[in-house]
Amino acid sequence: MSYSIGDGMVSLALAGGIVGYLYITHRTRQEKLRIIHEERLVAMEKGIPLPEFPLENEQKHREPDPTILPIMGTVFVTLSVGAMVVLFLNLPAQTHSFWVAPLPLAFLGVGLAAYQFLKGQPGR
């Protein structure tokens, strides 16, 4: 397999984008901390008490959405059945038995839907 200059440029651009994103988020956080520090110093000079602020936003616990499992199960089943039909109709005769390759995804989708049904709490 040979790679072209374009492939290398795409991978470098992707890596540069990721590094740039991480740099920007780091700089934004550092700037926010610097502003909070300056405000606290000014408040301390004036004798104004300030409440403690958390440096990071707290993650709020959300209840899991009960509709996710049936949706994922439906998506897996439909995608895998569609892929099996396409493979069955388009593969040449010597590789015709590969149409069953997406079958594990179909079983995964059926298992997710069955789990939701057997759990007894239908997603509404």
Image (cartoon, rainbow, N blue to C red):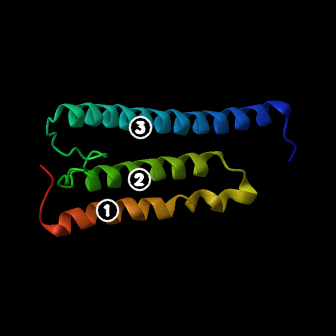
Q: What residue is disc 3 on?
A: 29
Query: Along the horizontal axis of the image, is 38 left or right of 102?
Result: left
99 above or below 3? below
Query: Which residue type does callout 3 highlight?
Result: Arg
Query: Which residue type does callout 1 highlight?
Result: Leu
- The image shows residue 103 at horizontal and vertical percentages of 50, 62
* Nearest-to-viewer mark from 2 and 3: 3
Furthest residue in direction bottom, as rendered: 118
Mark 3 → mark 1, Cα distance in angstroms: 40 Å
Point out the tag, 2 or 3, that comes first from the N-terminus. 3
State the SS at label 1.
helix
4 above or below 123? above
14 above or below 101? above
Circle 2/circle 1 CB separation < 8 Å: yes
Mark 2 → mark 1, Cα distance in angstroms: 9 Å
30 above or below 76? above
Query: Which residue type does callout 2 highlight?
Result: Phe
- The image shows residue 6 at horizontal and vertical percentages of 79, 30
Q: Which of 77 and 39 is in front in this view?
A: 39
- Number of residues whose C-alpha sits closer than 10 Å to that of mark 1, classed few (under 14), some (14–19) or many (20 or more): many
Q: Nearer the viewer, residue 65 or 10?
A: 10
Point out the tag, 3 or 1, that comes first from the N-terminus. 3
What is the number of the mark on residue 112? 1
Q: What residue is disc 2 on?
A: 76
Q: Nearer the viewer, residue 124 or 62?
A: 62
**Measuring 33% from the left and 32% from the top, which residue is drawn there?**
38
- Number of residues whose C-alpha sits closer than 10 Å to that of mark 2, classed few (under 14), some (14–19) or many (20 or more): many
State the SS at label 3.
helix
